Image (cartoon, grey):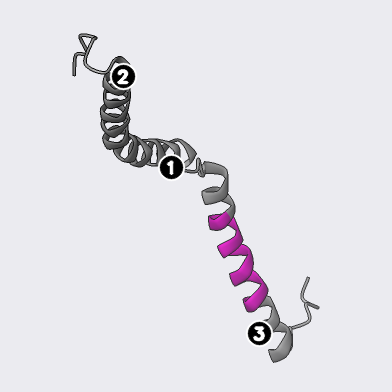
Amino acid sequence: MGNLIKPSLSETALWEEVNGVLLEARVVLQQLQEYRGAGDEIRQGVQEKAWSAVVPLVGKLKTFYVFSQKLACRGRCDIRT
């Protein structure tokens, strides 16, 4: 065992670089395995935004519908708003 060859400076530098990458890879791999995404949160946010846009339009559609019913009945029907 006393005949171990000492690595050169370039070999040592290469080993340190590779070792650093491997250490970082462990951390990244762990984070990747724990990653759950945000699909549900994104869908919920889109739904809430869509709902906020739709509610006022539904009110306008009701107004249009009631008006069209009044026109169709020409005042002869009991249309409730």
Quadrant of the image occupied by residue 16: bottom right
Where in the figure is residue 57, as x and y percent of width and height? 31, 36
Q: Are marks 2 and 1 in contact (CB under 8 Å)?
A: no
User: Of helix, strand and loop, which one carries label 2?
Assistant: helix
User: For the residues marked 2 and 1, what is the alpha-carbon distance in whole angstroms?
Assistant: 40 Å
- Please state the extent of the stretch shown in magenta in the rendering: 16-28
User: For the residues marked 3 and 2, what is the alpha-carbon distance in whole angstroms?
Assistant: 84 Å
Left or right? Give the position of 51 relative to 40.
Answer: left
User: Of helix, strand and loop, which one carries label 1?
Assistant: helix
**Mark 3 Cα-neighbour bin, 10 Å: few <14, some 14–19, many ≥20:** few
Q: Nearer the viewer, mark 2 or mark 1?
A: 2
Where in the figure is residue 23, as x and y percent of width and height? 58, 63
User: For residue 13, which numbered disc appears in the image?
Assistant: 3
Above/below status of 7 relative to 18: below
At label 3, which amino acid type do we have? Ala
Quadrant of the image occupied by residue 66: top left
The residue where tag 2 is placed is 69
At label 1, which amino acid type do we have? Ile
Where in the figure is residue 30, as x and y percent of width and height? 55, 49
Above/below status of 64 relative to 30: above
The verdict on residue 20 being magenta is yes
Q: Nearer the viewer, mark 1 or mark 3?
A: 1
Q: Nearer the viewer, mark 3 or mark 2?
A: 2
Sequence-wise first label, 2 or 1? 1
The verdict on residue 39 being magenta is no
Where in the figure is residue 34, as x and y percent of width and height? 51, 42
Prevailing SS of the magenta stretch: helix
At label 2, which amino acid type do we have? Gln
Q: Quick one: quadrant of the N terminus?
A: bottom right
Q: Nearer the viewer, residue 80 or 34?
A: 80
